[in-house]
Amino acid sequence: MIASVRGVVASVALDHAVLEVGGVGLAVRATPSTLAGLRRGEQARLATSLVVREDSLTLFGFASDAARELFELVQSVSGVGPKIALALLAVLDPEALRAALASGDTAALTRAPGIGRKGAERLVLELRDKVGPAAAPAGSGTVDEAGGDTGGSVLAWRPQLTEALVGLGFTPKQSEDAVAAVAAGTDDPAVDGGDVGQLLRRALSLLGRSR
């Protein structure tokens, strides 16, 4: 396996870049965000995954090892190949993708081209336990400097939820408005308990209706 490549960026196209490594130009497929960070003539290092087919050898590149690991992990699910795996990482950054899988956020997953509702549910079912929790458990009894219990307070989860929505591709203004609407719920166990996974689904539902 080719775990990474380092070399001078020879060219950058819409879906791939060419890196000169030891006198050989390697074409590396990557997401738009990864390609946007490359500059022609400059040195670059990409974590890579080599996909071998009967008629082709395709090298995929990523800005981080975490992204490469997720790319390979999602392909362990039946029906998910490298094209769909790359599409998931093009729509969701590694942390957002982990959060969506861990919290069962199928709405976020279906934003990727090629992923329908059933495919998203299968991804969650098979990978939820492999990606770890989306966030620290709510109500864990964390004590702040003033001696109070921060678990479950609105201040504890609002910034986290806003950041998650921005990571999913929404603007800061859209994210803040959705979080404010969710936080306005009174006598709501999810709000009072800081259930970030459930609150994220509600915010995405609100944002979906506003489009």
Image: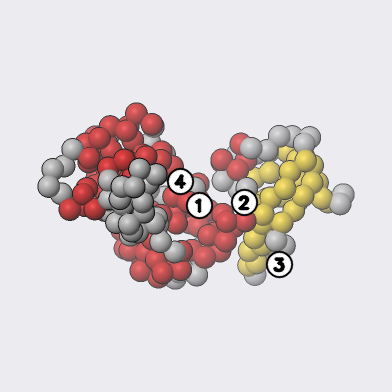
In which quadrant will I find the C terminus?
A: top left
Q: Is residue 109 left or right of residue 38?
A: left
Q: Mark 4 highlights which residue?
A: 91
Q: Which mark is residue 168?
A: none
Which of the marked residues, 3 or 4, is nearer the chain's N terminus?
3
Q: Mark 1 highlights which residue?
A: 94
Nearest the viewer among 69 and 176 is 176
| Callouts 1 and 3 close, C-beta under 8 Å | no
Which of the marked residues, 2 or 1, is nearer the chain's N terminus?
2
Residue 158 locus on image (x, y percent):
32, 41
Residue 11 locus on image (x, y percent):
73, 38
Please tell me which residue is depicted at 60% across the width and 43% down the height of the picture: 34
* Above-or-below relation of 42 to 188: above
Asked where in the image residue 16 lies, by quadrant, the reply is top right
Residue type at the position of mark 4: Val
Q: Which mark is residue 1?
A: 3
Residue type at the position of mark 2: Ser
* Above-or-below relation of 198 to 175: below
Question: How far apart are labels 1 and 4 at the CA level?
Answer: 10 Å
The residue sitting at the top extreme is 173
Q: Look at discs 1 and 4 and give the one toward the viewer.
A: 1
